[in-house]
Amino acid sequence: MPYDPTSQSNIDELKTNHIHLDLTVDFSAKTLTGSAELELEAVADNVSKVVLDTSYIDVRSVSSNGRALQFSLAKRHEKYGSALTVALETTLSKGTKTKVTVEYATTQDCTACQWLEPSQTVGKKHPYLFTQCQAIHARSLLPCQDSPSIKLTYSAKITTPLRAVMSAVPTGEDKHAAGDKTTFKFEQKQRIPSYLIALAVGNLEKREIGPRSAVWTEPEVLEAAAWEFVDTENFIRTGEALLTPYDWGRYDLLVLPASFPYGGMENPCLTFVTPSLLAGDRSLVDVVAHEIAHSWMGNLVTTENWEHFWLNEGFTVFVERKILGRMRGKEHSEFSAILGKKALQESVDLYGQDHPFTALRPCLRGEDPDDSFSRVPYEKGFNLLYYLEKHLGGAEVFEPYLRAHVQEFAGRSINTDDWKAFLYSFMEKNFGQEKVDLLNKVDWEAWLAGTGMPPVDNKFDDTLAKACTCLCKKWDDSRHTIPPTGFSTEDIKDFSSTQKVVFLEKVSELNPLPHGHLDTMDKLYELTNVRNSEIRLRWHLLCLKADYEKIYPEVVAFASSMGRMKMCRPLLRSLYKAKNGAELARETFIKHRSFFHPIAAAMIAKDLGLSK
């Protein structure tokens, strides 16, 4: 029986097989109005009611086959919303199916939706809407069993004055004779969890970039986006060679406005990505490898609940680095792992070594999954799989297992015990007792329940990191020479963008350099004006740690125009802690709060001590 501490729906009694949405987009009122029809099946006997998750949704009526049903909306739970309980006309026995239609409207408080004014878009002429349902925000887009343990198909009709796109395949569009509205139709035939239902509406155009891929975005950045993501098909083919055939038909990309809170969101058929990836040199498109890896890990094989989120993200990072290794060489994937380890250490430091959210399998009963969002499930999960591959005999043992994992669990939602049981059975069946004996030597309790950094310190190929370390040491050794000498623009001429990031991260680990040194570094390496958002982020954080007030206006400009939480949160947190920066950080956030997605705004408010 599925278990999900973050859902109030009766998943122990019913499962949703299909949802049909019929919604009208109203940019003036900033609402979606219409209905959700849920096809439900009893998984137990004597089921007399349907309980659905909702959050800030205005429920207007509930019916089944045209007959009104009695319903009640519970008092709001602070983190999980308001349970919608619907009394069924007849009691259902196990295997019996029924349909329930909920007429409703979203409200201004619905956290899944971000409504942008024209001024917040690139083109400045048209409004824009996009949704973000992970982790538990689908319930503020539609009434549903908002748990990843429930996998369903969906279809939709979206009526709007601007182009609509969804995490589904378009099946047609009807232009209305009167007015300027069009009804766009979609169908997702693969079973997905509710958090992967996604919608965007705006002045969107598309450009084909491969045999099964296109990029969607505002026309002003279409050319740049199409150029940046031209390698998408190579990523997909490499993933297929490693795992199984790509199962979703289309793989399109939607480049969103800057307030999108994540680097990417693996919505099936249409990955949502941040415009911060548009570096102009294809240096940041590894995020696409990550989102493509989700086509298998997360979308096809899904975590049962958010306590096992590492099964989505740890596996995805592992596959992402496998793809990068095959396309660019092992030293590149190992270099990425070094960067990831640093990010994991930062997450552990932020929570504290003993914090339960630093465990790979945390307990989230009574918790908001967004509060546990960090690099832990990604990088600690990756490190476990990396360790297991080495421990069990390398890629020739582990890559066949990876493929079998997808084949075994495709279309299902699983927990850590399911994963571990299949790992044991696969190794025993294919490689014998020797591998089982090796698995028995793994300290599972330390890996899965232990807090802090991983119990095993994996060593990665540091070939590409050596030059970064060497240059960092040179700067450190020069700290008492004023002005610093022996540096030039040639120092980083042959560095990749990732090497520049690692160099800056290594410098940030030192005691702060004198401000004169930072002046020289910026003059030689042109860091303040760099377009690459990852390099810019590290430079700003390095300067903030040194209380380098000259950078504060640049930090304010960057943090208030980049809604990706990976960037705006640490920037505002660090500005808040920097000398003479606390009030500026709060003022910046308060002034620009409407720019940030509701998920990001809530997290930043907590970071700055401004939450209710």
Image: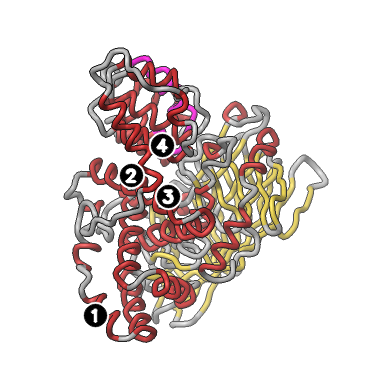
Query: Image quadrant for the C terminus?
Result: top left
Q: Taken as a whole, is the magenta stretch helix, strand or loop?
A: helix
Q: What is the secondary structure assignment of the residue under circle 2?
A: helix
Q: What is the secondary structure assignment of the residue under circle 1?
A: helix
User: Residue shown at 63%/53% (left/top)?
Assistant: 252
For the residues marked 3 and 4, what is the alpha-carbon distance in whole angstroms? 40 Å
Q: In front of the other: label 3 or label 4?
A: 4
Q: Amino acid at mark 3?
A: Ser
With 57 as the anchor, is 247 left or right in this view? right
Q: In front of the other: label 2 or label 4?
A: 4
| Label pair 4/1, CB-CB below 8 angstroms | no
Q: Which residue is mark 4?
A: 501
Q: Which residue is mark 1?
A: 437
Q: Is residue 591 above or below residue 91?
A: above
How crowded pointer 4 is (Cα within 10 Å; few <14, some 14-19, many 20+) is rated as many
Q: Amino acid at mark 4?
A: Val
How crowded pointer 1 is (Cα within 10 Å; few <14, some 14-19, many 20+) is rated as few
What mark, if any, has residue 343 been given in the picture? Answer: 2
Q: What is the secondary structure assignment of the residue under circle 3?
A: loop
What mark, if any, has residue 55 been given in the picture? Answer: 3
Q: Nearer the viewer, residue 482 or 549?
A: 482
For the residues marked 4 and 1, what is the alpha-carbon distance in whole angstroms? 41 Å
Q: What is the secondary structure assignment of the residue under circle 4?
A: helix
